[in-house]
Amino acid sequence: MEDKKANIIAAISILALLVVIIAARVSLKLSKPFYLIAGVDISLILAVFCFLIIRIRYNRERKLLVSRFLSEGRELRTEYSFLRKVAGVPTKFRLEDLEEATDGFRSLIGKGGSGSVFKGVLKDGSQVAVKRIEGEEKGEREFRSEVAAIASVQHKNLVRLYGYSSAVSANRPRFLVYEYIVNSSLDIWIFPEKGNRRRTGGGCLSWNQRYQVAIDVAKALAYLHHDCRSKILHLDVKPENILLDGSYRAVVTDFGLSKLIARDESKVLTDIRGTRGYLAPEWLLEHGISEKSDVYSYGIVLLEMIGGRRSISRVEVKETGKKKLEYFPRIVNQKMRERKVMEIVDQRLVETNEVDEEEVMKLVCVAMWCIQEKSRNRPDMVMVIEMLEGRVMVNEPPDSDVVVVDLLAADDDDDGSSGGVRRVINVPRLQIQRERNFRLPSVCSSIISPISPR
C-alpha cells in the first residue's frame, strides 16, 4: 500500500513539473528565466526518478531479506521442535493446532474414565494420539509442573509425551499429546470377546509375545518407581493402558497425571483412583498407597494375560440360573496348589501346543506374589524383572484364601457385563498420613540385584 502511494505521488510530481515547464515556455518564450526554470524542473524530475529507482531496489532487497528470514525462522522452529522432542521438553500446542491435527476431533480411537483419545497428524507429519482430559480439577501450575516431569521420562516401554494444551478458561478441557502406537491396547489382543468384536480373524498374542509383554511392562513400572527423579506411581495399571507397537512390544500409557512423590516418601495421601478389578487392598485396609499398589495391579494383569479372561467376571449358576461374580485369582490359587496350572491357561494358547508348563507355573507364582494382600509381602518391580528373566529363583508364594475379592468392585447389583472394567469415581478421600524415611520390606530383598531395569 505504501509503495502504491509513493508511486502515485511521484507521478503527480513529475506531471506537475512538466506542466510548469510548458507554462514557462508559453509565457516566457526562450528567455533566460525559462531556461532557469526548465533546468530546475528537469533536475527535480531526475531526482524523482532516482528516488523511485532506489526505492524499488530497496523494496526488492527487503523482500528477499524478509523471505530469507522467514525461511530461516521456519527451519529454526523445525529444528527447535525436533530438539525439544529429543530432549523430552513438552511443547505447548494451541487448541487450533490440535483441532487441525485431529480434523476437528473426529477420529476417536479410545475413551476412558479420564477422557477421550483422538488420532491426529501434526504439521511435521508425526502421528499423535491427542487425549482430551475431562473433569480435571488440578490447578494450572500443578498441571504444567506434572506435564514437565512426565515429559522428562524417557524409556522405550513408556509412551512419549510430545506436549500439551492448557485450558485458558474453566470450561475448556486440557489436552495431552502422545506418540501414536499402531497396535492399540493389550486388552483386544488377550480377551477373546474384544478380539472378535474389534478385529476380523481374531487378535490373539502368542505365549512368547505375552511373556515379553510381561517383561516390558515390569521394566516400565520399575523405571517409574526407581529411576526417575520423582517417584511416579501409575495407579491405573490395566490392559487398556498397555499399548502394543508394531513389533508387539508393550508401551505403558496413561501414567501422565497419576501421582508424583518425593523419593523419601513411602506412602502418600491421595484420592482413590483406578479401575475395579485392579485396585490393591491397601486402598481401604491399610495406611496409604505406595509403588506396591502398582505391583498388585501388575499381578492382576499378569494373571489376565495367562488366562485370557478378566480377573472379575460374571458367571451363571446352573442350579439357580442367576449370575454371580467369579474371582479369577482365587481359581488360579487353587489350581496352583493342585499343580494343574494348565487348566487356567487361555485355551487358544493351549490349542497351539506352544505353552511351556514350567513357564506358566513361574508366571503364576510371580503373579501370586504380586497380589499378596499385605503390601510388605509383595516384591518390588525390580525383583519381578529378576524373577521373570530367570536371574532369581521363584519360590511358591504362601497359601492364601484370597479373602479380599476386590472390595472396591464387588457390585452385585450391577447387571452389566463389563467384566470388571470400570473406573472408581465419587469415593471419599482417604485420611492417610505421609510417612517419611520408612522402607518397605520386600520378599527376598537380600538378593535383589542392583542392575537397573532399563
Image (cartoon, rainbow, N blue to C red):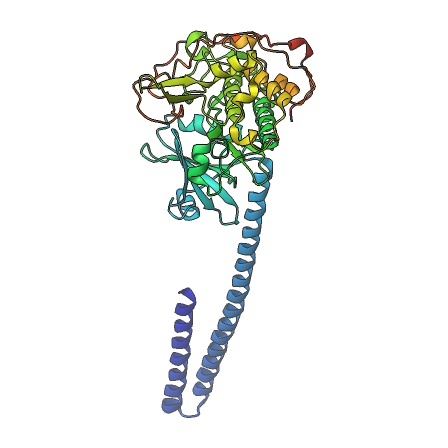
Give the residue displayed 52% in from the left and 39% down from the top. 183
Closer to the camera in the image, 56 or 398: 398
> Is 255 left, or right, of 19 in this rendering?
right
Residue at the spot 43% in from the left edge and 34% down from the top edge: 194
| Residue 264 appears in the figure | no
Residue 197 visible (yes or no): yes
Q: Residue 452 is drawn in which quadrant?
A: top right
Residue at 37% from the left image edge and 14% from the top image edge: 429
In the rendered view of the protein, which quadrant contains the C terminus? top right
Q: Position of residue 403 (x, y in %)?
A: 44, 8
Q: Position of residue 336 (x, y in %)?
A: 56, 14
Instruction: Please identify the quadrant where the N terminus is shown.
Output: bottom left
Residue 98, given in percent of the width and then of the height, sits at 42, 44
Q: Quadrant of residue 392?
A: top right
Look at 38% across and 21% down and name the residue there: 315
In this rendering, the count of numbered labels is 0
Q: Residue furthest bottom?
A: 29
User: Residue 326 or 73: which is nearer the viewer?
Assistant: 326
